[in-house]
Image: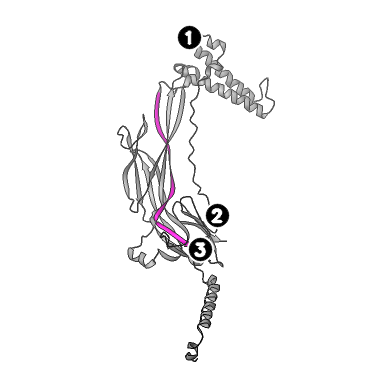
Amino acid sequence: MDFGLLCKIPNSTRIMKKLLFIIAVLTAAPCLAQTEVNSFFAGANEGVTYYLPDTKLEITVNTACITRTPGEFNRYAERYLRINNAIASADSYWEFTDVKVKSIGIPNSEKMYTIKLNNSTAGNVSINESGIIEAINTKPVARSVAEVVLPTSKKKQNDASKYMTSEILQATSTAKMAELTAKEIYLIRESKLAITRGLAENMPQDGQSMQLVLDELDKQERALTELFIGRTDTVYHTHTYTLLPTAKCDTTKAVLLRFSRKLGVLDKENLAGAPVYYNLRDLKSVKIPTAEELEKKKLLKKEGVCYNIPGKAELTIYTGSRRLYDEEIPIAQLGVTEILSKTLFNKKTSKKVVFDTATGAVTNIEDQ
């Protein structure tokens, strides 16, 4: 080729050739599309910005206040009803019912990334209200967290007088009232037995009517029997605490709260209660890379999508005599950050990916 001839080409012709070359490159760009994710710098990148989370633990402690009230005829319970465990004196105390732990993701400002909006399908990303990545190329899956539902707190009303006959109410002594009330209880039991055996004189017309009658007789029997055995009322309470584990989270015998059988849940500074402790132990389930290894991986600028591989911790909550909770929990802070390959998000092999918003882990990958 004569290089002298090239030098003689007019400037306009050379400019036209440059434009044609640029157009050819742009036309071929989809074939060269890449999933590029960079760490976030304000104003430096254009694309969808997301966080990877740290894991916060929400601890729910459920307790019950139990009040025991003796019945009016408690002294006659064994004589007339053969009940030997009737409540003898008024008493009130607290006890634990259960402890629940829920993992919650909070944005980690040091793990903020931007997915560039090029021809990669990774730009089809969903993030939650906190900015944490939820899914790519699919709808996010709601986390199945068991909702804490306390039993209904309800104080029973002593309505036994509604079921007392005039003979009982006109009795001149407590002993006589107890005797007549016991007889009424036995009559109710006999009525229930006659209905269930089909021997009652006025049998209910159908199964639904029979059940309504039996339920009403049960209610009457319970109300009258409480006059002998006493009444137990239970009121439920819930208290919530949060823990944010660190990368070095080995904690032993830390005080979470204090608890008194007479006063219930107390602040951990209140010495009127006995301490409730927790241990949080890193199980070292994920090998943490050294600084040199991180540098080699260059995680902060690489083609792909960043995600967490969480480590595991064992959380134990206990008193001096009882273990209330003991489970292994995935914790983002105890793990490492890795990259989903760019090849998962090209147009030919595009994948649907779902993330756990509490840990930043990948929970599912499948074809679109």
Measuring from the top left, give residue 139's x and y in whole percent.
Answer: 55, 54
Q: Magenta segment: does it hold 102?
A: yes
Q: Which residues are magenta?
A: 91-117
Q: Is 207 on the left or on the right of 85, as rendered?
A: right
Q: CA distance from mark 3 to mark 1?
A: 89 Å
Work out whether residue 117 or residue 142 is closer to the camera in this orientation and state it: 117
Q: Which amino acid type is shown beneath numbered disc 3?
A: Leu
Label 2 crowd bin: few (<14), some (14–19), many (20+), radius 10 Å:
few
Quickly name the residue at label 2. Answer: 139
Considering every residue shown, the one lying at the far top of the view is: 172
Q: Quadrant of the C terminus?
A: bottom right
The quarter of the picture where residue 27 lies is: bottom right
Q: Magenta segment: does it hold 307?
A: no
Say if residue 227 shows up in the picture: yes
Q: Which amino acid type is shown beneath numbered disc 2?
A: Lys
Circles 3, 1 touching at the beta carbon (< 8 Å):
no
Quickly name the residue at label 1. Answer: 173
Label 1 crowd bin: few (<14), some (14–19), many (20+), radius 10 Å:
few
Measuring from the top left, give residue 111's x and y in whole percent.
Answer: 40, 57
- Which one is closest to the eye, mark 3 or mark 1? 3
Q: Residue sitting at 54 percent across and 12 percent down? A: 168
Q: Which amino acid type is shown beneath numbered disc 1?
A: Ser
Q: Residue sitting at 53 percent across and 21 percent down? A: 223
The quarter of the picture where residue 95 lies is: top left
**Mark 1 or mark 2, earlier in chain:** 2
For residue 124, above or below residue 197: below
Q: Secondary structure at mark 1?
A: loop
Measuring from the top left, give residue 224's x and y in whole percent.
Answer: 52, 19
Quickly name the residue at label 3. Answer: 117
